[in-house]
Image (cartoon, coloured by chain):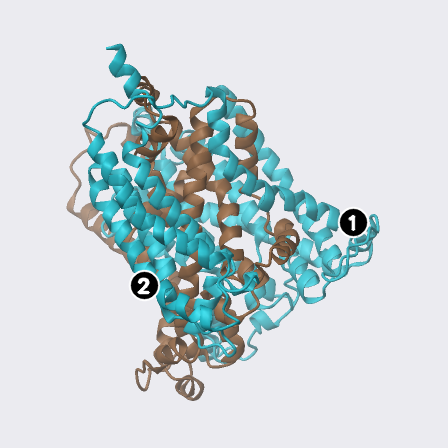
Chain colours: A cyan, B brown
Amino acid sequence: MQQTLSRRSTWFDGWDFSGPNVMALLAGAVMLFAFFFLPWFGDNVSNNGARIMVDILYEAPGALRTEALIWLIPVVAVATFAATLWGAMAPEQARIASPLASLLGLTTLLYFVPALGRAGAHPLLTPGAGFWTAFVCAIAMVLQFVLAMPAVAERGGAPRKGVRRGRLPQWLTPYLFIALPLILYAIWILGPTVYTMYLSLTNWDGVSTPQFIGLANYERLFTRDRNFVESLVNNLRWLIVFILIPTSMGLGLALLFNNEMWGGRFYKVSFYAPLVLSLPVIGLIWAWLYNPRLGLINSLLSMMGVTNLPGWLGSRELAIWCVIAAAVWRQVGYVMVLYLAGLKNVDPSYIDAARVDGAGRLALFRHVVMPLLAPVTTIVIVISIIDSLRAFDLVSIMTRGGQGTQVLANFMYMEAFNNYRMGYGAAIAVVLFAISMVFIAFYLSRAIRDELEY
Amino acid sequence: MATQSIKTQPISRPAPTSVSRAWKRFLTFLFYVVLTAATLIWLTPVLAAVVTSLRTMDDITINGFWSWPREIVFSNFERAWTTARVSKYLLNSFIITIPALIGMLFLSSLSAFALARYRFRGNLFIYFIYVAGTMLPFQILLLPVFRLTNALGLYDSYGALILIHTTFQLGFCTFVLRNFMRTVPGEIMDAARVDGCSEFRIYWQIMLPLTLPALAALATLQFTWVFNDYLWAIVLLRSDVLRPVTAGLATLRGQFNTDWPVITSGALLATIPTLIVFVFLQRYFIQGLTLGSGK
């Protein structure tokens, strides 16, 4: 008894199955990483595999000419990933996944063989770190199959002796799991947030070293910049419209479609379909509708005999509302979906009970349905606010911030990347962040409360 | 008042007379007419784009938008696909989206597993950092990330976009997966542990398969999010050959200034991948949307 237990709990036992899997996965991941991030030839990172592939594909002038087979690398890496994941999810498939991965590795070597031959011949094409890394990974993929065989064969055999009981200390486990994601998150998200605050106190122009200038950026922003006021007002308009219209329309539609009805699915899908369109697509389509001479709206108006046609995106008074209308069009479906999900969770017995008690439709809605939907409403409002503060794509595509449609996000982008006033842009970003933070804090405080109750 | 009294006695309601039945049928009919009209109006922008893309600009200019099309042409799609290079932009979008998806799902499932299943110092704190991060405005990250990618030599490469998408979406994915993993009963894991299963294997072979529904929903949702990103594409890329389709469309507009049929065809072509995802994985898409708000 004791014997079997101790054998079972050896560290390597858990890896018998997934050992080759993990190896293939790692090889795939590293290969993909090398392809995207490491220099394929020489030591200049801009010569990474992805870049070379694109240059070959698009026949860019001055491209490094290597084997066009280079597309094998990402395809194989992703395929290995998929095959291995499949093998790991259903352990009985591991026997198929493992040779599949090795076969893929073998295919990749096809790329390296001629590339290696040519690389030596050309002085410019000295294989770089990425090339070698991917090469090693391809070999590892082939090798893992060989390694997997004895492991699989050994499983039924006698218990292994002298295997280290390499269990890590228990307290370390969660930190090991969380380390890599958290480090990446700290470098790319948390660090930059703080760094922007520092940049907002400098006069950085994107090229020279940032120089500390105190609060000068903020002073200019709050006292002398009319664009800032305009952006702030527009964001406020956006926010108010976003809280009022999509929320009420979405709720109304959700209540309507929550009932079984003929063709309900079709209507539902139609209303949330705009959600799949990307914002640039929506911006382009709506810009075409608003076209002052030929667009759908104005041609309809002129057919109806209107002579004084509005300029829509060209008019300073209307433009911002036109942009917001396009945004609302997309948001309504989102809110509807959230409310529909919320309504699905409402216990029908509450409603039946209220009905039996003689509640009318309005009373039912006000005193039963709405309170039950309160958590969804909070989420919807928080999402609406955050989305309205993030508003960028539509303004950038439809008007580029002209015609009085400037919003904070686009204002920041233009100051930083068109006018190269990066320090000033950072100050705008910090203001935007501060406004968002109010709502984030509100949401967080609720989340924390829920969590502590849990 | 009258409706109330009816509502109170739903069972003993008198049989409807033929007049009221006819009236009711008429009302139902009217309701569907209004609803269909509203739906059509709602979809007008999309329908207008489809109609425009099938006509020539000359036709629209001469005969007006509301005239009956003189002929149906597909050349606009052809021009958008080849001349305007939408095909290449779409390929770029995939090259960026797929690694980012794999990266964010793998990394976030790791951290979600730790946050959901272990008690340790800073657990809740880290969780709330992730939650707060999901709502950050992108602008606060723009400049430092721009600088960082430059410093790493990744500016103007796919890698820059893959990294920022992976890391930014880590917050949301971790949040969703963590809450999902908490609903998995702990007995399964304890049983596995008693049997001597390593912690990593518990994550890999027990937790991940059980989390598959949430992963599928997240993958679908994140696919559309990353695919539809525009801001990072214009900030971190300079070369036209690397642009994903969203940024490519903006170029398209400059290139085909007033040729709206080509522009709308490009926009429609750009929507195809997300449309396919939407049509075939709609259930997951909706689940993904509501997962985040379920808490």
Residue A302: image x %, image y %? 48, 79
For the residue marked with disc 2, what is the amino acid? Leu
The chain holding disc 2 is A
Q: Secondary structure at mark 1?
A: loop
From mark 2 to mark 1, how far is it between C-alphas?
54 Å
Count the marks: 2
Q: Is residue A285 left or right of residue B37?
A: right
**Is the residue under label 1 in contact with that under label 2 (CB below 8 Å)?**
no
Q: Quadrant of the N terminus of chain A?
A: top left
In the rendered image, residue A70, in percent from the top left (x then y), is placed at: 39, 65
In the picture of the structure, the residue carrying the numbered disc 1 is A201
Q: Where is A228 relative to A299, above or below?
A: above
Pointer 2 local density, CA inside 10 Å: few below 14, some 14–19, many at least 20: few
Res. B279 in view: no
The local crowd at label 1, few if under 14, some if 14 to 19, many if 20 or more residues have their Cα within 10 Å, is many
Q: In terms of depth relative to the viewer, which is nearer, B92 or B43?
A: B92
Percent x, y of residue A295: 47, 76
Q: Does dot 2 land on a helix, a strand or a loop?
A: helix
Q: Earlier in the sequence, mark 2 or mark 1?
A: 2
Disc 1 residue type? Answer: Leu
Q: Which residue is drawn at the image coordinates 68% and 43% (left, top)? A: A194
The residue to which callout 2 is attached is A110
- Image quadrant in which you'd find residue B126: top right
Along the line of sight, the residue nearer the viewer: A70 or B107: A70
- The answer to whether tags 2 and 1 share a subunit is yes
Q: Is residue B255 visible?
A: yes
In the rendered structure, find residue A221 and report the number of the disc placed on it.
Answer: none
Quick check: A277 left or right of A44?
A: left
Chain of the residue where label 1 is placed in the rendered structure: A
